[in-house]
Image: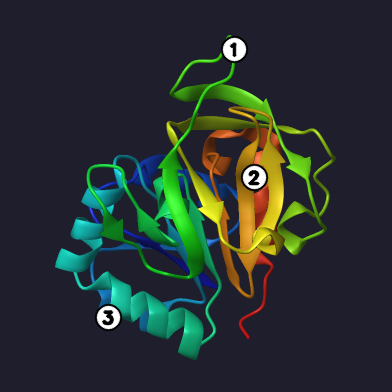
């Protein structure tokens, strides 16, 4: 089993690598889309603005290669933080831009409720909306670590696996087929985050 971590210049590659290795994975960090042929799983990390992320991915030739690897070859894909947002069809952070399009919908700036601040930084609960392989063994209300100002708004509400109670409640984990997105940082979320990564590594190639 080899999990390819996409290096497009906007990710916490060191902490992601360490977490995945702790979970027993063979990790390949690559800036070359051709290396997808070596992978059994794909992880798309990311920190920064949506528009910048799209530009970096496009400049390095990742969008077409990722879609082929997932939609044609059946590789499981997990996007985390900005990586999750890049899975959406559109986003407006840093200017309107088209995302990878694995999920229909947009990425929008969150509107805080009374007493809240943006960005949303720190530990917050995961509220399960429906069962999913990635949340196996993770109790309702478990805390994960978040750092974000924008959130996804999927067109199809059935893609939402879990929410977090911030800014009126936003999607924290989404999934469709063999593609998932986590708004939180599992690599920084202690035991629960490692369990989620282990669950992802246990997903089978279709």
Number of numbered discs present?
3
Where residue 166 appears, as percent x and y from the top left, is 62, 27
Residue 88: image quadrant is: bottom left
Q: Is residue 157 left or right of residue 117?
A: right
Q: Position of residue 89 (x, y in %)?
A: 41, 64
Q: Secondary structure at mark 2?
A: helix
* Quadrant in the rendering for residue 132: bottom right
Report how far apart the C-alphas of labels 1 and 2 lie in the structure.
33 Å
Q: Residue at x 43, y 43 (%)?
A: 108
For residue 56, side relative to residue 150 (left or right): left
Q: Mark 2, residues whose alpha carbon is within 10 Å: few (<14), some, or many (≥20)?
A: some
Asked if the residue under mark 3 is in contact with the one under mark 2, i.e. CB atoms within 8 Å, the reply is no
Give the number of the disc on residue 114.
1
Q: Residues within 10 Å of mark 3 (few under 14, many from 20)?
A: few
Residue bearing mark 2: 194
Q: Nearer the viewer, mark 1 or mark 2?
A: 1
Q: Quadrant of residue 130?
A: bottom right
Asked if disc 1 and disc 2 are in contact, CB closer than 8 Å, the reply is: no
Instruction: Determine the CA span between mark 2 and mark 3.
Output: 28 Å
Is residue 188 visible to the viewer in this orientation of the structure? yes
Q: Secondary structure at mark 3?
A: helix
In this view, 83 is above or below 138:
below
| Mark-to-mark CA distance, 1 and 3 | 48 Å
The image position of residue 112, as x and y in percent, is 53, 22
Residue at the image position 63 percent from the left and 50 percent from the top: 173
Task: Decide which of tag 2 and tag 3 comes sooner along the chain.
Answer: 3
Vertical relation: 126 (above or below) 178: above
| Residue 34: mark | 3
């Amino acid at each position: 089993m080899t999990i390819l971590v996409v290096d497009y210049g906007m990710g916490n590659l060191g902490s992601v690598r360490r977490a995945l290795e702790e979970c027993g994975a063979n990790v390949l960090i690559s800036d070359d889309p051709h290396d997808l042929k070596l992978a059994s799983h794909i992880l798309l990390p990311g920190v920064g603005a949506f528009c910048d992320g799209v530009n970096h991915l496009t400049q390095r030739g990742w969008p077409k290669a990722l879609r082929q690897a997932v939609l044609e070859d059946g590789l499981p894909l997990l996007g985390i933080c900005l990586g999750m947002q890049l899975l959406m069809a559109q986003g407006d952070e840093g200017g309107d831009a088209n995302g990878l399009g694995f999920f229909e919908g947009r990425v929008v700036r969150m509107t805080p409720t009374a007493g809240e601040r943006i960005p949303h930084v720190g530990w917050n609960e995961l509220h399960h909306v429906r069962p999913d392989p990635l949340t196996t063994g993770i109790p309702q209300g478990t805390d994960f670590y978040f750092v974000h100002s924008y959130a996804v708004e999927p067109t199809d509400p059935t893609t939402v696996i879990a929410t977090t109670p911030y800014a009126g409640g936003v999607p924290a984990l989404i999934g469709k087929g063999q593609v998932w997105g986590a708004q939180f940082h599992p690599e920084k979320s202690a035991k629960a985050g490692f369990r989620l990564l282990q669950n992802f590594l246990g997903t089978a190639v279709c």
